[in-house]
Image (cartoon, grey):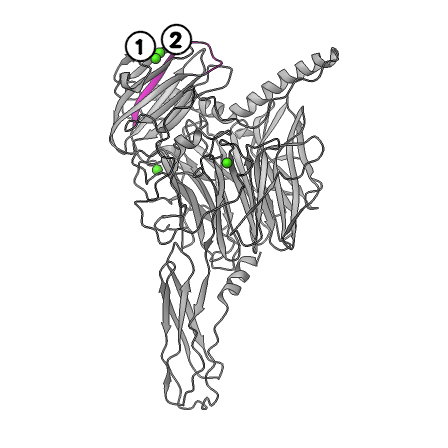
């Protein structure tokens, strides 16, 4: 494993750019990224201060307290006005250009019986212990905005349990995480909670199964802060089965630091918690998000997060503690990367994107036990591309529909105005398959807006989304988008309710791909380390052509000792607007990644799903993935039923020995041919199984071999053993015992 050299020194002005232009582009873009990352929290704090003032005034007058805003993220006001009349593809096609072995059965974890047609369940987390599975999600049903489901049959069916328990006055708000102590079978749930009207915090509650009954513990408040001074976000929880400890990290937005990553610990099952300790560096204050802790087989504790850099690159940070979080080693930087905070993947229905890391530690007894893996997405470098090199296009009304769009060539600056509260401005452009385009709304003083790219084939499919949808107006937005096919596309500026009318300016250009790893709007990468300090060069995990925006990757090491990565994948749609779930795995400890496989059954059309979603960003800010002694268990948001629901599946990572050779009688000086059949239970990946044959009769023979079995396939093991002529006759036969492979796999996974 070689040390990884950050590419920072290679960054610099691109063709047509002066050093000063490059520097100012980096500076302005990074300010925009920081603003986009912290927008939600800042607005919540701002709203809380307004609420506090109104509440004080109401109290003085003896009036009831004003209503507080919800911390839930409602889907954006549909700037298309009434629901568009298109629903081109309610019954999604079931096809993929990619051959897959067997797509495992997908199972919905939430019960839709109480839902309206647009009730969203998304942003899920999953943990499993034996045949007990707990899944939690953001739930648009309310009045508690977190829900859960559980399974007692290994994930084949789920019971929707409603909302986790609360203390008096609590409202579960968002960002659920579940984890399990594999030694005790105790599950833990955490999420953002609003304990009172003026505070926000993180709640934790345990859950155990008694037979088929899920029994919740008593909720506890790990932490709370005043709404007007701080906002907690993106908590993540992990149970350490070596000590019984719980570790909790989160992002704390506040005035003094802007934001930072905090750490807390509980040694009594979540009943009480240590005070929050900042573990991100002061130098990164105001620029960090998306922390996740993970525990290794020796109780070693890692936490990773993303830091927005002041130069063009952003950074994955990581710290390790070998003292259960009492002290931490120095922060290391596993990777430098280019992020895409401007826009999520197609259908991500919030006007910005996320690129946060997922972390896993190999806790099996395999050869890579203790290895740490990270997976994340990154984009091309958009900073070294000159924009606006081809002059300016001024809009010409009426351009309110795609059919009367103003044509432009990427590289031309666009100027226009949202001149009425129903104004939409369409611009059309020709794009070349695989080419990357940058659209930056870098001046819009007074109006709220959405900026979208639409597919030219139907003029309706939403492919990229940026903008500023919440007061105050004036927020810049940007899109990095890669054309999935050559053709005409539309860029649309649209007025959003709540702003004033006014002018805007959009910078456009083509982004060249140079030495950066990312090839388009997003690719999935993974890196690994055996000590948490020295990290491998990142390796790309997805194998689709460089024109789709893979999104929300998750990584885990399964009981077979192999790291697996899952993500949203758009490769099977010509317009790049519909997704399946894909995964890959590495059979060499993360050095190389296997041919990608699809594991969701139904293609999702997120443009239509957004019309049936009451929570942005529809698919959530994260998916999740866990593994137990036998199964890999992805959980993701899936809109096949209309609105987003939480789906899971299980990918068998075990094997069976069948057709086991029975007893054979043999004589000295002869040979015998015991045979077995190995069944690869993994429906998606071929495996090679090593075998060893040894004698219990002091015969001088040891046979070693390997046998390959296709995904879901079986293969015979045939041996020919020469029996020594000095061997005693096996009058009662040669007992060839079949081992119990599932049990041995269970030992591997449970050796935690
Ligand atoms: Ca739903
Ligand atoms: Ca206009
Ligand atoms: Ca217009
Ligand atoms: Ca890609």
Q: Secondary structure at mark 1?
A: loop
Nearest the eye: 521 or 76:
76
Ligand 3 within 8 Å, label 1 CB: yes
* Residue placed most toward the observer, 631 or 299: 631
Q: Earlier in the sequence, mark 2 or mark 1?
A: 1
Magenta-colored stretch includes residue 437: no
Callouts 2 and 1 close, C-beta under 8 Å: yes
Q: State yes or no: residue 500 in magenta.
A: yes
Closer to the camera in the image, 91 or 536:
91
In the image, 297: left or right of 33? right
Per the image, the residue denoted by label 2 is 419
**Side of 749 relative to 210 (left or right):** left
Q: How far apart in space, not on screen, are marks 2 and 1 (Cα)? A: 10 Å
Residue 79, horizontal then vertical, whole percent: 43, 19
On the question of residue 492 being in view, the answer is yes
Rendered-image quadrant of the C terminus: bottom right
In the rendering, at what x and y percent does residue 416 appear?
34, 11
Q: Position of residue 235 (x, y in %)?
A: 58, 36
The magenta-colored residue range is 497-511
Q: Quadrant of residue 432?
A: top left
Residue at figure coordinates x 36%, y 67% from the top left:
715
Asked whether residue 386 appears in the rendered view, the answer is: no
Secondary structure mainly formed by the magenta segment: strand
Residue 397: give its label. 1
Instruction: Report crowding for label 1: few under 14, some 14 to 19, many 20 or more residues within 10 A (C-alpha).
Output: some
Q: Secondary structure under badge 2?
A: loop
Disc 2: residue Cβ within 8 A of ligand 2's nearest atom: yes
Whether residue 295 sits left or right of residue 408 in the image: it is right
Which residue does the image show at 45% across and 54% down from the upper left?
Answer: 562
């Amino acid at each position: 494993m070689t040390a990884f050299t950050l590419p920072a020194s290679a960054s610099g002005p691109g063709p047509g750019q002066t050093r000063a232009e490059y520097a100012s582009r980096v500076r302005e873009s990074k300010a925009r990224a920081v603003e986009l990352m912290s927008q939600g929290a800042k607005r919540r704090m701002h709203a809380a201060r307004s609420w506090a003032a109104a509440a004080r005034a109401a109290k003085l007058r003896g009036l009831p307290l004003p209503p507080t805003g919800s911390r839930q993220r409602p889907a954006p006001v549909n700037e298309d006005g009434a629901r568009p009349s298109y629903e081109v593809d309610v019954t999604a096609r079931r096809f993929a250009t990619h051959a897959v072995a067997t797509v495992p059965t997908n199972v919905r974890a939430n019960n839709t019986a109480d839902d309206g047609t647009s009730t969203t369940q998304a942003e899920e987390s999953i943990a499993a212990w034996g045949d007990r599975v707990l899944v939690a999600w953001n739930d648009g049903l309310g009045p508690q905005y977190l829900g859960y489901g559980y399974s007692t049959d290994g994930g084949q069916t789920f019971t929707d349990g409603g909302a986790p328990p609360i203390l008096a006055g609590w409202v579960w708000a968002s960002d659920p995480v579940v984890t399990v102590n594999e030694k005790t079978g105790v599950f833990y749930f955490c999420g953002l909670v609003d304990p009172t009207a003026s505070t926000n915090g993180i709640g934790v509650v345990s859950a155990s199964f008694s037979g088929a009954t899920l029994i919740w513990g008593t909720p506890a408040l790990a932490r709370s802060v005043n709404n007007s001074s701080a906002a907690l976000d993106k908590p993540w929880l992990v149970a350490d089965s070596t000590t019984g400890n719980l570790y909790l990290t989160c992002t704390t937005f506040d005035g003094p630091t802007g934001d930072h990553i905090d750490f807390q610990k509980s040694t009594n099952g979540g009943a009480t918690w240590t005070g929050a300790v900042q573990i991100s560096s002061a130098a990164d204050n105001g620029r960090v998000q998306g922390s996740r802790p993970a525990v290794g087989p020796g109780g070693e504790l890692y936490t990773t997060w993303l830091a927005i850099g002041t130069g063009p690159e952003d950074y994955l940070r990581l710290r390790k503690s070998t003292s259960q979080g009492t002290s931490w080693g120095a922060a290391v930087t596993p990777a430098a990367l280019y992020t895409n905070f401007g826009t999520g993947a197609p259908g991500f229905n919030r006007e910005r994107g996320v690129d946060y890391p997922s972390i896993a530690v190999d806790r099996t007894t395999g050869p890579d036990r203790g290895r740490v893996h990270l997976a994340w997405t990154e984009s091309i470098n958009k900073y070294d591309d000159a924009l606006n090199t081809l002059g300016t296009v001024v809009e010409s009304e009426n351009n309110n529909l795609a059919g009367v769009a103003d044509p432009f060539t990427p590289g031309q600056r666009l100027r226009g105005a949202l001149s009425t509260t129903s104004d939409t401005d369409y611009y059309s452009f020709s794009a070349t398959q695989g080419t990357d385009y940058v659209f930056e709304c870098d001046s819009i003083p007074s109006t709220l807006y959405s900026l979208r790219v639409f597919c030219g084939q139907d003029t309706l499919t939403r492919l990229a989304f940026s903008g500023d949808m919440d007061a105050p107006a004036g927020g810049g937005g940007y899109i990095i988008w890669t054309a999935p096919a050559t053709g005409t596309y539309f860029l649309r500026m649209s007025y959003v309710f709540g702003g004033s009318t006014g002018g805007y300016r959009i910078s456009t250009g083509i982004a060249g791909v140079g030495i950066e790893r990312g090839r388009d709007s997003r690719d999935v990468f993974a890196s690994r380390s055996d000590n948490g300090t020295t990290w491998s060069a990142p390796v790309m995990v997805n194998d689709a052509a460089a024109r789709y925006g893979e999104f929300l990757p998750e990584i885990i090491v399964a009981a077979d000792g192999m790291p697996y990565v899952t993500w949203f994948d758009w490769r099977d749609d010509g317009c790049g607007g519909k997704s399946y779930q894909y995964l890959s795995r590495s059979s060499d400890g993360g050095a190389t990644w296997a041919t990608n496989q699809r594991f969701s059954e139904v293609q999702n059309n997120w443009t239509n799903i957004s019309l049936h979603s009451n929570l942005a960003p529809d698919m959530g800010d994260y998916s999740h993935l866990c593994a137990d002694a036998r199964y890999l268990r992805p959980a993701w948001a899936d809109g096949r039923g209309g609105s987003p629901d939480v789906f899971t599946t299980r990918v068998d990572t075990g094997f069976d020995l069948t057709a086991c050779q029975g007893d054979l009688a043999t004589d000295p000086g002869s040979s015998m041919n015991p045979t077995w059949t190995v069944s690869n239970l993994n429906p998606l990946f071929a495996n090679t199984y090593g075998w060893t044959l040894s004698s219990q009769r002091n015969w001088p023979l040891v046979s070693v071999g390997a046998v390959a079995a296709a995904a879901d396939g079986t293969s015979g093991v045939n041996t020919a053993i020469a029996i020594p002529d000095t061997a005693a006759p096996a009058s009662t036969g040669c007992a060839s015992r079949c081992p119990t492979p599932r049990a041995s796999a269970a030992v591997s996974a449970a050796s935690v």
